Amino acid sequence: QVQLAESGGGLVQAGGSLRLSCAASGRTFSRYSVGWFRQAPGKEREFVAGISWIGGIKNYADSVLGRFTISRDNLGNTVYLQMNSLKPEDTALYYCAASWQSSGTYDYWGQGTQVTVSS
């Protein structure tokens, strides 16, 4: 089992940057794939970026490709989301989630961190 806690959200102007962190508990964190998701008011939750547990394979939503970068530090039990060139449409509550190895199912979720981008 793993527990997740996001941090790093805040208010930023369009064009600015933020780095989100997802800190995990548990000794087997390196065997979890991790994803970042977001949910804006009145919209469904959407996938933003993911990194696999083996090989560190990364994938991104088209809307953030080239602007966001996901990375992980297994020794520090942390996954990061570097967000550059932020747009007002990136405003949302951002969550990280963990999926055991390559199960494809995200079983563990954090509480979220708010990102607000002003125009």
Image (cartoon, rainbow, N blue to C red):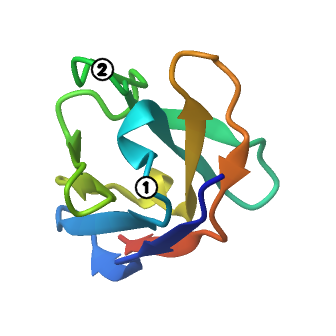
Q: Secondary structure at mark 2?
A: loop
**Residue at screen point 53% across, 75% down:** 114
Residue closest to the eye, 119 or 97? 97
Residue closest to the eye, 60 or 111? 111
Residue closest to the eye, 18 or 35? 35
Q: Residues within 10 Å of mark 2 (few under 14, many from 20)?
A: few
Please, is residue 102 above or below residue 48 in the view?
Answer: above
Q: Secondary structure at mark 1?
A: loop
**Residue at screen point 17% across, 30% down:** 66
Q: Percent x, y for residue 4?
A: 55, 64
Where residue 45 sits, quadrant-wise, is: top right
The type of residue carrying mark 2 is Ile
Q: Percent x, y for residue 97?
A: 58, 47
Q: Which residue is mark 2?
A: 54
Q: Which residue is mark 1?
A: 27
Where residue 112 sits, quadrant-wise, is: bottom right
Q: Percent x, y for residue 38?
A: 58, 50
